[in-house]
Image: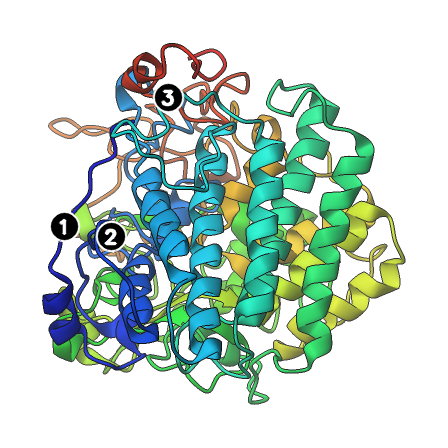
Amino acid sequence: MKIKNYIYAFSFLFMTTGCNDNFLDRLPIDQLSTTGSLATANELRLYINQFYEKLPNHPAFTGGEGIAYDDARTDNMIFTTVNPRLNGQLTISNAQALNEYKDIRGLNFFLNKASGVKGNQSDIDQYIGEAYFFRAWFYFELVKKYGDVSWVNSLLSSDDESTLLARDSRVVIIDSVLNDLQKATTLLGTKANSSSMRIHKDVAHAMISRVALYEGTWQKYHKAKNTGFETSTVTDAKIKEYLTAAKEAAQVVINSNRWSISTTGSELTDYRDLFNTADLSANREVLMWRKYNPAENIGHGVSKYLSTGGGDIGVTLSLVDDYLTRDGRPFVGTERSSHQATYGEELLPTIRDPRLSQTVGVPGEPIRPGGTVAAFPPINQSGMNRNTTGYPMYKYIEYDNMAATLDDGMSAAPVIYFRYAEVLLNYAEAVAELGEDSQLVIEALRPLRQRVGMPEVNFDREFNANSDYAFNDLGKVIQAVRRERRVEMVAEGTRLADIFRWAAADKLIVGRRPLGALFVGSNLDTENSLTGFYNSSLLYYDTAPAGKSVNFYLTGSAGAALRYIDPYKAVLPNGFGFKVNRDYLLPIQQRMIELTDGKWQQNPNW
């Protein structure tokens, strides 16, 4: 694959990087040469620092790539433009280079050279452990994108690197990833907080839990549905092995007693404040995070765009509906429609799980210094000021930081890579998938519920049997775990991976259109008048007066009593066109196939 080396003078890096372990708030550094020597523990640290910069960021602008907006490419949130992958519109020309192999080569070089380094052995072990972690990270990213890839764990002498290697089964890759992570757990230091922002032993255990749960459920559900994306030779015993590994790794973190769910006892603010607090060094829920520092020109744009109430993004009705009532029941039937009749009422923490009001903007809540969420959403605006669904995204807004809400690059809300809540969710899901004692699930999820004052899980009470609920055919325990994961982890970059590993695109994506708030049947419609909130730019649906055109879309047809915002109605009359026999994996570049003399073959149906 003709991997190129980016050469950067080691001495210059030494001078510019310095000795501060809190390096994640510094400007990115270039990839180092893989031709030089590594002689000291400090040189190991300087070399390995570059890979931290490859971890995901928050987006710099509205519509951009990044953790906070990742869910806009799922059923949780949407932009104005339709996501081409969900709509089955990607082509071979969209295939990307497998850039992860550049980083893997750099890590293989590091591991090859690090064994001869002299110095403090615990420091050397720490950086070698970080290298094993990062190699596992990049291979896991490749598997999620492409499935089978080639495992390369040594430096190859040919300039062509691994171009003549066939693709290994994803099972081989995942087993190798888990092996790397297991090595990391034996080398990395133990930490009880994330102040160093470096990988530590519990992060590696959390990663094992994440990877093993992903692969165990991927193989289980793709095999059950015979999608063709499961490994043909995978056995039920192998699937159980992965799920058991996920459970046990999560249990190691739980039993360490070093971590806990962050709470001050404020049920209505503790969840949201976790995601807009600039410094999480002492937070016992956060295992690993990225710090931003706008004063040093290291920031992002999330707060600026979301604090308009728009940001060209909106939370979907599907997500809002998945939050339970305040007493732990599905939000359905006449109770649902009656609260939807007054805009914002369905979001109130007196009525629903308080995580909803800390994720979606509720009218009157602070959105910037001196400003609050508007009484009605800016669904009639355009560009970055527009809200796409009527449900404004609220998570990550630094509502007490004026600069963050006014200027590009001034947001300091952190990226959280691993937090204890995910560990609990991984444990609960693995237990549920293994069919073990459901009381363990209740106990694992109890801290998440307690933080926001919700009752503990009751599988019978909260089971959603409605015919239009996508997971009404699942067992009660697994349905509850999936719902809890969705509402706890929204906008943290996990939803698409969850949909894909559950082989659930057929239920959640195909033929569906993401909807928004109730319009006809609510006071949003009455505000759409010359004397109402939307008087400056009226919304026209069904028909428009002379000289105007339809600029807004609703479900159903004229005369229906209840009609919801339907942003993609005109462009997706038949719903998303995701191809379940193709789009679970991305296409391979034709160049890659040619370079391997055909040993790499194209992914199915591309």
**Image coordinates for residue 221, horizontal then vertical, percent:** 70, 31
Q: Secondary structure at mark 3?
A: loop
Which amino acid type is shown beneath numbered disc 3? Ile
Q: CA distance from mark 3 to mark 2?
A: 47 Å
Front disc: 3 or 2:
3
- Residue topped by disc 3: 588
69 vs 225: above or below: below
Residue displayed at 71% across by 45% down: 242
Which amino acid type is shown beneath numbered disc 1? Ile
Q: Secondary structure at mark 1?
A: loop
Pointer 3 or 1: first along the chain: 1
Residue 197 visible (yes or no) = yes
572 vs 15: above or below: above
Pointer 3 or 2: first along the chain: 2
The answer to which image quadrant residue 46 occupies is bottom left
Horizontal side of 579 relative to 249 (left or right) equals left
**Image coordinates for residue 158, horizontal then vertical, percent:** 29, 29
Residue displayed at 39% across by 78% down: 119
Q: How is the image coloured?
A: rainbow
View extreme (right): residue: 437
- Residue topped by disc 1: 7
Horizontal side of 605 relative to 179 (left or right) equals left
Horizontal side of 474 relative to 145 (left or right) equals right
Q: CA distance from mark 1 to mark 2?
A: 56 Å
**Image coordinates for residue 572, horizontal then vertical, percent:** 38, 23
Horizontal side of 270 relative to 53 (left or right) equals right
Q: Nearer the viewer, residue 123 or 276?
A: 123
- Residue topped by disc 2: 534
